[in-house]
Image (cartoon, rainbow, N blue to C red):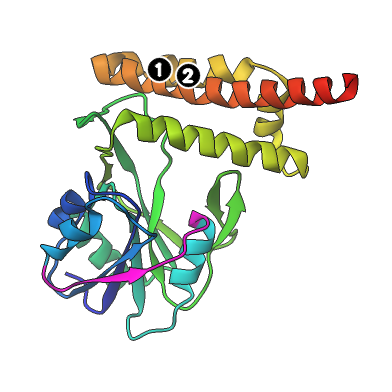
Amino acid sequence: MPRNMQVYILARNEEDNIAACLQALPRSGLQVTVLDSGSTDGTLAAVSRFSGVHVEPYAYTSHCEAYNWITAKKGASPYVMVLDADMKISDALMNEITNLIDAAAPQVIQAPVTMCVDGVPLKHGSLYPPKPIVFKAGAAYFTADGHGERLLPELDVQTCRKCLVHDDRKPYEAFLESQCRYSRNFIGRETSGRLDWQDRLRAGTWLMMWIVPLYSWIICRGFLSGRAGRAYALDRLIAEAIRCRFILSRKLHAKSSKEA
């Protein structure tokens, strides 16, 4: 296990996920801090069952700001690991991370992601890119990109072979609420002119509503993942449809305001 690595877990109302995240995390030699953004469910009670895990209140605004705040810390640990509460890291992945640090001391280590749909691993069809999870402490590494974040250019990034598991067990309503939040952020970025070419395509046409799920289902071979593949492609369709509905609402409101 890596020595002197601080692990941060971002959490808000994650009682359905946080125990599995902590249970899967290899604990030897690790300092673990849960950054809780005002949970009102059983998240803190679940964390309290794990000895040695520190909880720190955190005013979350975005993953980009959270990641940069964490990685810029200059503490006793030369590396920090940042996880969402619905992610699980295996012993095999941790061992690979340790070997990469010992051999190359990279600035960033990322891992491919195995998506789970209602607890079932998605073997084909996932659109989730490799996720940066380990960082050399003392620097900011991200810039905002849509509702998410992306790494700054020209970093020394090493990619693991073993996968990080993304297994969100929260009720489906939470997924829908997230998509509404992402869509509101999208409208804000559109209004301020901060859209990339893909988002401009989303704002101007309905093409992405069909392209994204079909890409998952056909190009990424989601059809080979059975029910999980169908559910995931449908989720991509729903996510894009919600965004389209928010865009239509904005345009209809603008039209009604002019006519009034």
Give the distance between the C-alpha atoms of the residues marked 1 and 2, in whole angstroms.
Answer: 5 Å
Under mark 1, the amino acid is: Leu
Q: Residue at x 29, y 52 (%)?
A: 85
Quadrant location of residue 201?
A: top right
- Mark 1 closeness class: few <14, some 14–19, many ≥20 residues within 10 Å: some
Specify the label residue 50 is tagged with: none
Q: In the rendered view, does 93 fall on the left or right side of 128?
A: left
**Image height of 40 relative to 181, above or below:** below
Query: Where is mark 2, residue-wise?
Result: 237
Query: How many numbered marks have been drawn onto this rendered protein structure?
Result: 2
Q: Tell me the element at label 1.
A: helix
Whether residue 90 is visible here, answered yes or no, is no
Question: Was residue 224 drawn as part of the magenta stretch in this picture?
Answer: no
Task: Pick whichever, 200 or 255, lies toward us.
Answer: 255
Q: Residue at x 43, y 21 (%)?
A: 216
Q: In the rendered view, does 229 fall on the left or right side of 27?
A: right
Under mark 2, the amino acid is: Leu
Q: Residue at x 20, y 32 (%)?
A: 119
Q: In the displayed orientation, state which residue is furthest to the bottom.
A: 76
Asked whether the beta carbons under mark 1 and mark 2 sit within 8 Å of each other, the answer is yes
The image quadrant where one finds the C terminus is top right
Specify the label residue 234 is tagged with: 1
Q: Residue at x 32, y 29 (%)?
A: 172
Task: Pick whichever, 38 or 33, lies toward us.
Answer: 38
Q: Position of residue 141 (x, y in %)?
A: 53, 64
Question: Was residue 57 drawn as part of the magenta stretch in this picture?
Answer: yes
Q: Position of residue 149 (x, y in %)?
A: 54, 51
Q: Position of residue 143 (x, y in %)?
A: 60, 57
Quadrant location of residue 182?
A: top right
Task: Pick whichever, 255 or 99, lies toward us.
Answer: 255
Q: In the displayed orientation, state which residue is furthest to the right.
A: 259
Stretch in magenta: 51-63
